[in-house]
Amino acid sequence: MIATLRTTVGAVAEAALPLGGLPSLAAPEDLVAAGARQGAHAERTLAGRVALRLLLAHVLGAPAAEAPLLPIDRTCDVCGEPHGRPRTAGASLSGSTSGPHVLVAVAACEDGAKEPPPLGVDIQELPRALWDGFDAAVLHPDEHLTEPAGPRARVDLWTRKEAVLKAAGVGLRIEPHRLRLVPRRTRGVRQWAVHECSPRPTTGLVVEDLPGEVPCALATRADIRRPTRAHDLGPLVPAAR
């Protein structure tokens, strides 16, 4: 089972109040990361990290109060600084924030598996307008979106590619326009598979849209057959109910 939580910064902050607020559910490194930012960006960073900890605690069967104690490593593969993708033993983790929106996911090891499946999620607040050069930066030369499709279709594509790049563990070190996605349908679910012409770390991955009023997507390996279960915030923090 892949567990997801889609919520908002405000909802996470409110749910954390009975347990002492966001800082009480964060690890020291989370507070440092949030402190390096300002204003809404700081609160968004902290809420995203706390939401991921709460979901991981729920998946592991641990109480919410123990969420700050869960070991989550964010060491960057390139520079060694603590700003890389989140990792923990026995589970894949991914998170994304944009504007007021928060999306996190956890996939634990399947029975008998040596390691959990790759996992990546992304959520994007819809902008009023796209920046100049968006299509050149995001669309593969063999991908085409007509202008009537508008910003939503383009941000949907960006979100899918971000999720894939996170699942591959490379982030934006691979430019999105080098990634080509092709539609497919598996067990009645519409997905997009990474075409074989794409960079090697991303091949074998698929991505699908998650429900919501803003673009959000989840990527994992194509041969993963486990379902996705969306969680509400309330049951993850019983004291908040």
Image (cartoon, helix red, strand yellow):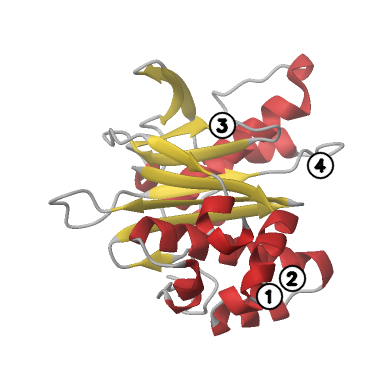
Q: Indicate the secondary structure of the residue bearing disc 1.
A: helix
Discs 3, 2 touching: Cβ within 8 Å? no
Q: Is residue 28 above or below residue 239?
A: below
Q: Which mark, residue 34?
A: 1
Q: Residue at x 75, y 57 (%)?
A: 10
Residue 189 at x, y = what percent? 43, 20
The image shows residue 181 at horizontal and vertical percentages of 48, 29
Earlier residue among tags 1 and 2: 1
**Residue at the outermost right position:** 128
Q: Disc 1 and disc 2: Cα gap in Å?
A: 5 Å
Q: CA distance from mark 1 to mark 3?
A: 34 Å
Q: CA distance from mark 3 to mark 4?
A: 17 Å
Q: Residue furthest left?
A: 112
**Does label 3 or label 2 sit earlier along the sequence?**
2
Give the quadrant of the N terminus: top left
| Tag 4 secondary structure | loop
Q: Secondary structure at mark 2?
A: helix
Residue 80: in sight, yes or no?
Answer: yes
Give the structural element (helix, strand or loop) at label 3: loop
In percent of the image, x 64 and y 32: which residue is there? 156
Question: What is the x, y in percent for residue 145?
Answer: 67, 20
| Residue, disc 4 | 131
**Mark 3 — residue?**
140
Coordinates of residue 233 in the picture (x, y in percent): 58, 51
Q: Is residue 186 left or right of residue 37?
A: left
What kind of residue is marked 1? Answer: Ala
Identity of the amino acid at label 4? Trp
10 Å crowding of disc 3: few (<14), some (14-19), many (20+): some
Q: Is 61 or 110 nearer to us in this picture? A: 61
> From the image, which quarter does the C terminus lie in?
bottom right
